[in-house]
Image: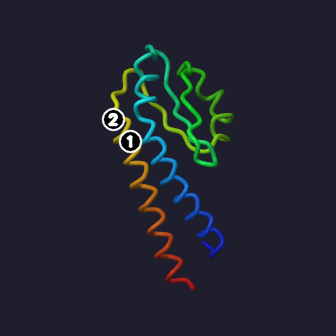
Amino acid sequence: MDAETARRAAEQARGAIHAAEVLHARAPVIARACAKAVEGEVVVAVVEPEFGFGGTWTVPADQLHERDQRLAQSGWSLIFSPHTPIDEIEGRALTMARQAFKRWEGLCRWAGHHR
């Protein structure tokens, strides 16, 4: 890995941390969408590239792949099952933030050793 690749990866990890914060803050909105979803659907919670909350999309699970590319351009997203409770949504957002922080921390260590 070169320094530029490491820098970009560290920026992506920092972005994921911020996106996780947005998702955590919007957990009540996401939980309401999950409560309305039915069997065979999934709820996609989206964070825009500028870190605004992009809303929730309820999508038939068998069509998720077709819509995945359009959603992927939206920044970050997490997918939830129908009736996912708020505490699980918050927990997944925290897990996302912790994993991104670990990536960021490791990349910073790598960069410090390869100057």
Q: Is residue 35 above or below residue 91?
A: above
Counting every numbered tag in the picture gives: 2
* Left or right of residue 53, residue 83 in this image: left
Label pair 1/2, CB-CB below 8 angstroms: yes
Which of the image's four quarters has the C terminus? bottom right
Q: Position of residue 26 (x, y in %)?
A: 45, 36
Which of the image's four quarters has the N terminus? bottom right
Instruction: Kindly identify the residue that appears in the image at 67 percent across and 41 percent down.
Output: 73
Q: Is residue 19 above or below residue 40?
A: below
In the rendered structure, which amino acid carries the disc numbered 1? Arg
Q: Position of residue 15 (x, y in %)?
A: 55, 55
**Residue 76, numbered label:** none
Residue at the limit of the structure toward the left, as seen here: 87
Category of crowding for the residue at label 2, using alpha-carbon neighbours closer than 10 angstroms: few (below 14), some (14–19), many (at least 20) = few
Instruction: Kindly identify the residue that appears in the image at 41 percent across and 44 percent down.
Output: 93
Residue at the limit of the structure toward the bottom, as seen here: 115
28 vs 74, nearest the viewer = 28
Instruction: Kindly identify the residue that appears in the image at 47 percent across and 41 percent down.
Output: 23
Q: Is residue 40 above or below residue 57?
A: above
Instruction: Kindly identify the residue that appears in the image at 56 percent across and 37 percent down.
Output: 46
In the rendered structure, which amino acid carries the disc numbered 2? Glu
Instruction: Please tell me whether mark 1 sits on a helix, a strand or a loop.
Output: helix
- Figure colour scheme: rainbow
Category of crowding for the residue at label 1, using alpha-carbon neighbours closer than 10 angstroms: few (below 14), some (14–19), many (at least 20) = some
| CA distance for labels 1 and 2 | 6 Å
Image quarter for residue 91? top left
Q: Which residue is mark 2?
A: 88
Q: Position of residue 36 (x, y in %)?
A: 44, 16
Q: Is residue 90 above or below residue 101?
A: above
Instruction: Please tell me whether mark 2 sits on a helix, a strand or a loop.
Output: helix
Q: Which residue is mark 1?
A: 92
Image quarter for residue 67? top right
